[in-house]
Image: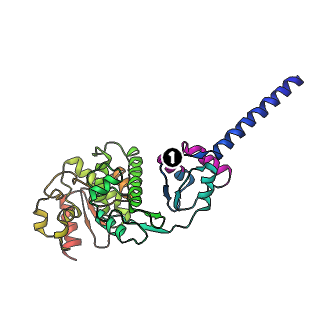
Amino acid sequence: MRRLKRLTALILLVVLGLAAGSVAVYVTRPLALPSQPFSFSLTQGESVRGAARQLQAAGLLKNERDFVWLARVTGKSGAIKAGNYELDAPISTWGLLNMLAKGRVSQGEIRIVEGWMFSDFRKAVNENPGLLHDTRNLTDAEILQRIGAPEKDAEGLFFPDKYYFPKGASDLVIYRRAYQTMQRHLAESWKNRAPDLPLETPYEALTLASIVEKETGQAKDRTMIAGVFINRLRKGMRLQTDPAVIYGIRAKFDGNLRKRDLLRDTPYNTYTRAGLTPTPIALPGLASIQAVLHPAKTNALYFVARGDGSSEFSDTLAKHNRAVDKYQLHQ
């Protein structure tokens, strides 16, 4: 019996030693960089799980769960700091965790605003003094090619957010990061979408989300506006959305949308053409993407602006016409 107890204790010590050795190897082994230098940014409020998921997707971490476990057992899971990070050489898992917990002062930042067009985004990038402007003389298509994006049109493909970067970084870093962030959010949202939506692809969802972004005056109306457009698509009705028409005439728009503009056919005139626009018309935020993929359950087919940023919704044309008369014609 004594020999059995000693053998059991010896086995336990060996197992604990092997486990400790495995942990030691995990925390001290250098991580292979996906690229050199490898840069990434964490936004304000990013959880350790969110950070680990991003780093696994980028190819730096092999298993996000192990990294989250290490952060929690060492008490560093709540200490992850927002900002830009850049790795010039391989770093251990322990070194990476300490770097994220310590943080580093960002030398530059740029804010992409929901509802901007891609041209607005480019203007902000070109005017940012902290960036190296490698794309200033490139076309939109050439920028997409440089960041490895397969799409032909840049509109809507970049996620509105605040991005950090080291001073003197190429502006391609910002375009690539914003594109990859949009792809990640869109993929996750599409995977969890409501059933039976009249949308065939994530790109169609992105396109409709951009329209919802431009139509939403108050956040509380967002899912209802999405619900109206979803209902119209189901019934084969034209979307009849002014922001799309304005996008189609662009430079010719003088601030006043006239009847002749609604009658002038362009690929983006949703009064003359059925279905979605050929591309997004703006950069939608996550709230608009989720609203399109989880729209309000409503019978409404129309809405009109009340003049205070909110909208009045109607399920018949007669009710809609009365709302237009009340809020638009007799203001």
Q: Is residue 211 above or below residue 187?
A: below
Pick the residue in front: 41 or 156: 41
Residue under the point 70% across and 37% down: 19
Tell me if I can see residue 196 in this picture: yes
Is residue 67 highlighted in magenta? yes
Query: Is residue 174 shown left or right of residue 80?
Result: left
Pick the residue in front: 132 or 264: 132
Magenta region: 52-75
Q: Quadrant of the N terminus?
A: top right
Image coords of residue 196 (percent x, y): 31, 42
Is residue 8 highlighted in magenta? no
Pick the residue in front: 35 or 232: 35
Image coords of residue 42 (percent x, y): 51, 59
Tell me if I can see residue 226 in this picture: no
Image coords of residue 145 (percent x, y): 31, 52
Graded by Cα atoms within 10 Å as few (under 14), some (14 to 19) or many (20 or more), the crowding at tag 1 reads: some
**Can you identify the residue that label 1 sits on?**
56
Residue lying at the far right in this picture: please name it.
2
Corner quadrant of residue 266 = bottom left
Amino acid tagged 1: Gln
Q: Quadrant of the C terminus?
A: bottom left
Corner quadrant of residue 174 = bottom left
Residue under the point 23% across and 49% down: 233
Residue under the point 53% across and 55% down: 88
Magenta stretch: helix, strand or loop mostly: helix
Image coords of residue 93 (percent x, y): 61, 49
Question: Which element is circle 1 on?
Answer: helix
Q: Is residue 309 above or below residue 147?
A: below
Q: Is residue 127 above or below residue 93?
A: below
Residue under the point 59% across and 53% down: 96
Corner quadrant of residue 8 = top right
Query: Is residue 166 shown left or right of residue 201?
Result: right
